[in-house]
Amino acid sequence: MEFASFKTPNGKSTYGMVTGDRVVDLGADRPNLPSLKAFIGSDEFVSGKVAPKGTEYALSEVTLLPVIPDAGKIICVGLNYSEHIKETGRSDSEFPVLFLRTNTSQAAHEAPLLKPTLSERFDYEGELALVIGKPGRHISKSEAMSHVAGYACYNDGSVRDYQRHTHQYTGGKNFDQTGSFGPTLVMPDVIKDRATTMLITRVNGQEVQKASLAQMIFTIEDVIAYASSFTTLETGDVIVTGTPGGVGDRRTPPLYLHDGDVVEVEITGVGVLKNTVVQEK
């Protein structure tokens, strides 16, 4: 199964089940489940017996939204691949390095990424995102995967100069519409072997990042357990699991994003997230 949040041709925000190049509007017939965030907490979703009833659209007719446009929390992991730590010159950490993103900092698949007028150091970061299905606190690593509703691709777009204004990442990670999340939510079973599940980022068709999910320093289970030690993970919360080496800021010469550049994040079995950079007006 595969799900998306989207706007119908008449502009109504809803969500649906995707099959090939079609999507069935599930939200129209479920007034008590107004969003994908609400739906993934339902018995229907948890049972895996989703009835695809509703108006059907071609994907080309609708406008995709970020997978979870109304997440309560977007928790991002920094410095979670050894090659990225090496290129930044940072030291290893005993615990996951975490920061938060806002919903307004995100764009959908094929929506523009906005290059801020205040910066010439706009960068890409291809990552795997997971969405929490079953809520919990103090989740053990052995139980962590039972809390995952599904996966999507993520581009944790970073405004590097603002990121370095202070010791905190917040400013550089939260300019409006600088990151992207999509194209769809896929089920956890699409990732069968993390060692052969590849994360690849391309800029204008050139491969700039490549790593397997097995190269994460802190695993998906580690991050869920750690985050839930201090906050309740709720249905629809998003965890973005970190980027490999190869970011533009650490290349020689640097490879920053500019108007017209096309960024793709591809993860085996999860999909391809594609966005074009547009200069903010």
Image (tube, rainbow, N blue to C red):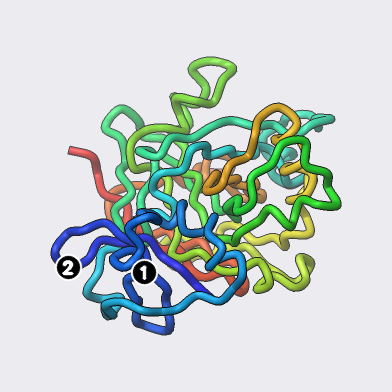
Q: Is residue 72 left or right of residue 63?
A: right
Residue at the farthest bottom position = 20
Kindly identify which residue carries mark 1.
26
Residue at the farthest left position = 10
Three-letter residue code for mark 2: Pro
Q: Please state which of the two labelled residues, at mark 2 or mark 1, is closer to the viewer.
A: 1
Q: Secondary structure at mark 2?
A: loop
Q: Secondary structure at mark 1?
A: loop
Say which mark, if any, is on residue 9: 2
Count numbered badges in the picture.
2
Q: Residue at x 44, y 51 (%)?
A: 68
Position of residue 100 measured from the top left corner of the image (x, y, whole percent) = 54, 32
Say which mark, if any, is on residue 189: none
Quarter holding the C terminus is top left
Q: Are marks 2 and 1 in contact (CB under 8 Å)?
A: no
Q: Residues within 10 Å of mark 1 (few under 14, many from 20)?
A: many
Vertical placement of residue 34 versus 158, above or below: below
Q: Residue at x 59, y 30 (%)?
A: 99
Q: Is residue 279 left or right of residue 97?
A: left
Q: How far is mark 2 from mark 1, CA to CA?
A: 15 Å
Position of residue 179 measured from the top left corner of the image (x, y, whole percent) = 42, 45
Q: Is residue 110 visible?
A: no
